[in-house]
Amino acid sequence: MSDSETVPSATAGTAAESLPPANAPASPPRAPGSAPALPQQALEIASGYAFTGPALDLGALIWDGTCLPDAQIRIPLPMLNRHGLVAGATGTGKTKTLQLIAEQLSAQGVPVFLADVKGDVSGISAPGEMNDRVRSRSAEVHQRWTATGFPAEFYALGGIGHGIPVRATVTSFGPVLLSKVLQLNQTQEQSLGLIFHYADQKGLDLLDLKDLRAVVTFLTSDEGKAELTNIGGLSPATAGVILRSLTAFEAQGMADFFGEPEFDTAELLRTAPDGRGLISLLELPAVQDRPQLFSTFLMWLLADLFHDLPEVGDADKPKLVFFFDEAHLLFNDASKAFLDAITQTVRLIRSKGVGIFFVTQTPRDVPSDVLAQLGNRVQHALRAFTPDDQKALKATVKTFPNSPYDLEELLTGLGTGEAVVTVLSEKGAPTPVAATRLRAPESLMGPVEATVLDEAVRSSQLYARYAQAVDRESAYEKLTAARTSGGAKGPDEMKPKEAETPRAPKEDPSVVQQVVGSGMFKSLARSVGTQIGREITRSLFGTARRRR
């Protein structure tokens, strides 16, 4: 691990700054993979990691049970946007590995996002503590270890738990994504799309769940049921399903997540005053038993970033790297449509300069279509106690390139802080499989005290911006006021000024068709110069951007 001062030497492709064991004889520094004392096969493996450009240091090669500190295992910095996987059984060191990588990314000026389900990564903001284990490990892998804390912001979904509250409006979430998490069928999803379209046309802001509930209730009432007659209507049965799904949704703790002020995902792209990348920690221990809340937010976050970030192609370093701890929560019980949306997002967001690392127990937790896009792999030990475990082990081995190791035996015998690694080289080709003894993180390996965490949250410049929920006038208030004043407003009365144009009546059917998944979607999406085109572009991932 290298901090902001030692990273340049580590990324130059030499071991000149490595710290040898105290009893080792003096010897000149050697480039990784060039030591003549290495066995031939180990030399061939190590040569695959002798990159000439900037890279992150993972650790030292293990060959025939021996750690070879002259053979350093690394990941090229430009390849971090090609996505990756950190996997392994509980207690094998996955969390420390993502902490190790996140530290070096920050030191290289790359912002990092960490979804911390268990709450044990907050220590990345504090300097680590030297002890016998750290001293031994740093000597084994020739690491010049320095206790270092890294700049961090702490977030919490809807303010549930410690952290700056993260919220989204129902409008920006959009009907497609909301339909997926509500587990609506195709007909119900189409109806929800009509509801969103109606609210948009009438200037009824859907900021929180009560706004959506109010619009659904209005459109099935005697005063409002005629509003959608010309575009299909909303049956009472479908409205009832949507309202019941919203109730169940709220019971999972989703209500606090929706509202204002809405979180601006550009906050995740910041760097600290000293140039290091800011590490954004989404603290999730308070909601780890609500996977629907967790997975919904991640999908919205990715979609929001995808919409806003420009295409960059292959860059010298990523704009942002995500780490999704406990990734199985993202995929468990997800519908095929939801998985397809994730797959598409992962595939396309790479060109925006965003890298995604999934952190989970076995590669089987990640759908094959997503797994195929993860070019960087750090596989910790797997257990083979049951027939299912053995099947998972064999499946994992098949996902690696050909290797001189007996991977089935190796993966069950790795110790804590050891892993099997293969990454993408600077040319984009997979590197040889390398058993690796990993470096020790330089920050605190464990959570910080709750009082320290709370103090860091309150002292953040973002706290005043997002801490206090705002409930401004929106659909609920407008519809309530209309009823108390003697009846609901008609279409012309609630229509916003920008909708009162000669083109609006002509384009309405196309908007409805795109909301429900019409075949005209792709061609209309190209019309970005019009209001309709912008709406369609936003709805590609089930989101709508209004605040920027």
Image (cartoon, grey):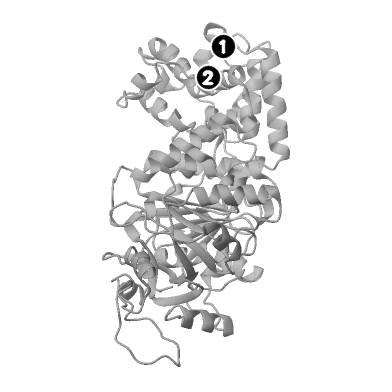
Q: Is residue 107 above or below residue 478?
A: below
Say if mark 2 contacts mark 1, CB within 8 Å: yes
SS for callout 2: helix
Mark number for residue 546? none
Quadrant for residue 304, please give it: top left
Sequence-wise, the earlier of marks 2 and 1 is 2
Q: Is residue 199 above or below residue 210?
A: above
Q: CA distance from mark 2 to mark 1?
A: 8 Å
Q: Is residue 11 left or right of residue 488?
A: left
Read off the residue under disc 1.
228
Q: Is residue 206 above or below residue 287?
A: above
Q: Quadrant of the C terminus?
A: top left
> Looking at this view, is 331 or 45 the one in front?
45
Read off the residue under disc 2.
198
Task: Identify the residue at horizontal 40%, vertical 84% (top origin).
Answer: 19
Q: Is residue 282 above or below residue 197?
A: below
Task: Identify the residue at horizontal 58%, vertical 72% (top origin).
Answer: 445
> Looking at this view, is 228 or 498 the one in front?
228
Mark 1 residue crowding within 10 angstroms, few (<14) / some (14–19) / many (20+): some
